[in-house]
Image (tube, rainbow, N blue to C red):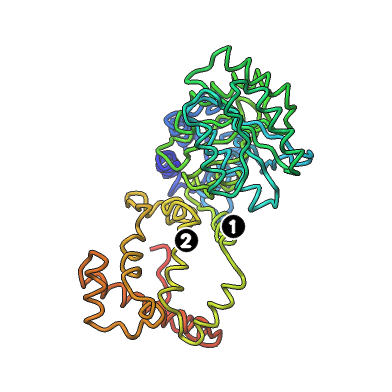
Amino acid sequence: MFENLQDKLDRAFKVLKGQGSISEINVAETIKEIRKALLDADVNYKTAKAFTDEVKEKALGQNVLTSVSPGQLLTKIMNDELALLMGGTVTELELTGNPTVILIAGLNGAGKTTFSGKLANFLKTQKGKKPLLVAGDVYRPAAIDQLQVLGEQIGVPVYANLESKDPIAIAEEGVAEAKRNGNSVVIIDTAGRLAIDEALMTEISAVRDATKPHEILFVVDAMTGQDAVNTAKIFNERLDYTGVVLTKLDGDTRGGAALSIKSVVNKPIKFIGTGEKMEALDVFHPDRMASRILGMGDVISLVERAQQQFDEEKAAQLQKKIRKNKFDFNDFISQIQQIKKMGNMKDLMGMIPGAGKAMKDIEIEDDAFKPIEAIIHSMTPYERENPDVINQSRRQRIAKGAGTDLQEVNKLMKQFNDMRKVMKQFSNPAAAAKLMKNMPKMPFGK
């Protein structure tokens, strides 16, 4: 996410490295590079110019502290201004209706139906709501089937009328169904088009007028860059929507839509999609995204994702097992499953300060855990519960069953045993403190 922009901004800041103060000359050169980086990322030209003019004005008005370099100061200013450019603060959904009606709009291929499923899952698991999905796309082949599959996958009911081709009537029926069944939120998936046309706009406007939604969310493909912003502007003129959803931010996106859309349509980005899984939906935090763009990570979001997968009861049981040195391969594979649910591995690495930059040229496949899982699944239940019994002959059988070689099994066994030792030490606070005290100091900054 935003790798190219991050690299170019990093190069721009290098102009100020080694400078003792901020001056008109060195700031002008840096600002020129920043503006070029934003335009290369497909940011709207007026937005890029206004943004860099603001950064320049603030930078020239600052006194550089002896403990802060000009480069660090400009990074701080950039971070604050990027956050403001993308909205400044997080904007929550309006969920006061009974039921709350949420209308989903956008072009074909933007990911409206997938987002509808993700939003329903988010409201059910994170907000304790009882959502109903309404299949209002009567034109795209298999759109209704897709929504029904997603609904079944996340345990959310879907209202569909296969006999009707009237999206306005279907939307009204869906709201009535929610009232009858006590659903607290109605999410109406609507039809898109390959391009903006009058028929699309008239139809979506009619659905809005009939259902009087509390939220109208415009779903846009972040990979379309500046075109996404232009489309957002036209939709907003007709619908006056309440928020934007950026999808496919895990793809090869330049970031122009995320940086431009708020300033062009003056509507907040409320959610971002970062993968195909139903859990791959994040509330949009402008300040956190600014930090990620500047390569400073996003530890808060990383912790929040971990907490979503955290089970206190299971964690307490696991801690007891670790203390007794009973951590086994069943526990190990359970931890792998929790990590996988947190999202795309490269995306997770980008949330760790400095790690994203270090990993930018390293491909991390989503199925990176598959070889490990194959080895563990080739073990018998007894072997998974009692790792110490896995001798050489058992390892050979496990390797054959997993379709790998003995060397890979031996490597996993060594890593697992080393991990068990460390976990055992850290489960005892006194032993952990002693271990940390005796660790060699890391040469940070070299």
Locate residue 336: give its quadrant: bottom left
Quadrant, the N terminus: top left
Locate residue 59: give its quadrant: top right
389 or 224: nearer the viewer: 389
* Residue labelled with disc 2: 339
Residue 73 horizontal/vertical position (percent): 55, 47
Residue 384 horizontal/vertical position (percent): 38, 77
Q: Secondary structure at mark 2?
A: helix
233 or 211: nearer the viewer: 211
Residue 213 horizontal/vertical position (percent): 72, 30
Would you say residue 63 is visible in this rendering?
no
Q: Is residue 366 above or below residue 48?
A: below
Disc 2 marks which amino acid? Ile
Q: Secondary structure at mark 1?
A: helix
Quadrant, the C terminus: bottom left
- Mark 2 Cα shell of 10 Å, populated few (<14), some (14-19), many (≥20): some
Q: Is residue 30 above or below residue 414?
A: above
Residue 404 horizontal/vertical position (percent): 22, 65
Q: Is residue 299 above or below residue 50?
A: below
* Residue labelled with disc 1: 304
